[in-house]
Image: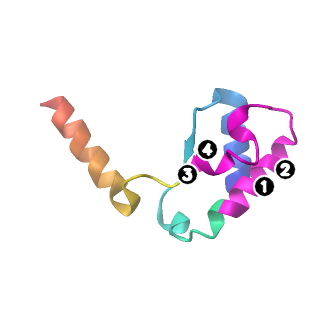
Amino acid sequence: YLAHCCAVLVYVVSPELIVLGGGIMNRSCLFPLVRRKLREILAGYINTPQLQAENIDRYVIPPAYGSSAGVQGAFALARRAL
């Protein structure tokens, strides 16, 4: 399901990268599975450098701040509002 969601994002908005976070993504073993399935779903239809096998690890990534990404984002929004 995550790979299908990523495929829809690729088809609709063509993001520069996809960041997957949250509790379930704490299981790092899911990232290779999602990446592989995403490439399988796209089946070469979208042929960009970031979706190639050697680059996909830098396209579907975990959040840089790990499990505190939500809190860091909230602080950033608060700073911007001030």
Q: Is residue 1 visible?
A: no
Return the residue found at the far left: 82
Mark 4: secondary structure: loop
* Disc marking residue 61: 3
Residues drawn in magenta: 32-61
Going by the image, does 33 lie left or right of 61? right
Reading the image, the residue beneath label 4 is: 59
Does label 3 or label 2 sit earlier along the sequence? 2
Numbered marks: total: 4
Disc 3 residue type? Ile
Reading the image, the residue beneath label 1 is: 37
Disc 1 residue type? Lys
Determine whether label 3 and label 4 are within 8 Å by CB.
yes
Does label 4 or label 2 sit earlier along the sequence? 2
Determine whether label 4 and label 2 are within 8 Å by CB.
no
Reading the image, the residue beneath label 2 is: 40
Q: CA distance from mark 1 to mark 3?
A: 14 Å
Give the camera-side residue of 21 and 58.
58
